[in-house]
Image (cartoon, grey):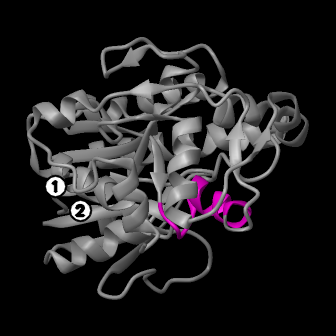
Amino acid sequence: MKIIVTGATGLVGSALVPSLIADGHSVTCLVRGDNENPPHPGTTAARWNPETGTIDAAALEGHDAAVHLAGENVAEGRWTDEKKKRIRDSREKGTRLIAETLAQLSDRPQVLACASAIGYYGNRGAEVLDENSSSGKDFLSEVCRAWEAAADPARAAGIRVVHLRIGVVLSDEGGALAKMLTPFKMGAGGKIGSGAQYMSWVALDDVVSAIKHALGDESLKGPVNVVGPRPATNAEFTKALGEVLGRPTLFSVPAFAARLAFGEMADALLLSSTRVEPKRLQSAQFKFAHPQLDGALRHVLKK
């Protein structure tokens, strides 16, 4: 297949693109800035800028599929009003630009897989959530609703749109786990708040496989939860990570301390509880390579 990818240098994109190339697909990466070189060997580059609404539409003709992963990193820096605007605008404007552009092509792709997040569901305690569950009421829930709605032009043009509601991605290359490694390796790791909040995690390899599955399985459309089948509480995750690293996990971060350090982001990313199951992936016969937390941690940390 010929596949368009945005966000090709991010955590997921950096793993997805080489995997697609290895499978024999042709990949066009949408890139920003002055560097016109493709971000990965064996790919081609096309220009776009969601902030200005510019995109090289002609370079996107004749592709079979598109994967849209680009967006401002939600876990970098405090959530000032300016940061929150960048988070929302990068997702809404970027998705609308790619969706409108694909819809107007004469030879448009059959499927658009757009990143979203389990933040769609908000803080829901121990409630078991699937793709039919309602959205939450916090900032990230609002962002996810706008993010997914921005793909409507592609949907209206007959393109199959998949919203990849991705959970906490496990990788030592970036994301939440990479940030945890230093304190845990120093023996200073521990649970956050009560530790009862659920973390719906997924190994990076399984994210890549789920995206490729979504591109090829015509039964998948709309929201698809990209999470492992066994979510863990923060306390369970802490214990498992400590055991894999062979380090104690005696320390803990009280909720008030997390809020002092990170502000609103602490409630949304560290203290929020989202217990999500991958119902549609499982119904589509998707097989997780790393369904167990201990095995997933040992795999990504090469232990």
- The residue drawn where x is 42% and y is 74% is 302
User: Which quarter of the rendering shows the N terminus?
Assistant: bottom left
Provide residue 301's location: percent of width, then percent of height.
Answer: 47, 69
- The residue drawn where x is 50% and y is 50% is 240
Provide residue 76's location: percent of width, then percent of height.
Answer: 73, 53
Q: Nearer the viewer, residue 61 or 95?
A: 95
Task: Give the distance between the C-alpha atoms of the residues marked 1 and 2, in whole angstroms.
Answer: 5 Å
- The residue drawn where x is 66% and y is 24% is 139
Q: Which residues are magenta?
A: 171-184
**Amino acid type, residue under disc 2 in the picture:** Glu
Q: Is residue 39 above or below residue 195?
A: below
User: Which quarter of the rendering shows the C terminus?
Assistant: bottom left
Provide residue 52's location: percent of width, then percent of height.
Answer: 62, 53
Q: Quadrant of residue 103?
A: top left
Q: Which residue is mark 1?
A: 107
For the residue carrying disc 1, how many other residues have a C-alpha within 10 Å: few (<14), some (14-19), or many (20+)? few
Q: Quadrant of residue 67?
A: bottom left
Q: Nearer the viewer, residue 259 or 298?
A: 298
- The residue drawn where x is 19% and y is 62% is 63
Q: Are marks 1 and 2 in contact (CB under 8 Å)?
A: yes
Chief SS of the magenta region: helix
Q: Nearer the viewer, residue 147 or 164?
A: 164
Q: Is residue 275 above or below residue 184?
A: above
Provide residue 153's location: percent of width, then percent of height.
Answer: 34, 33
Left or right of 260, for residue 76: left
Q: Earlier in the sequence, mark 1 or mark 2?
A: 2
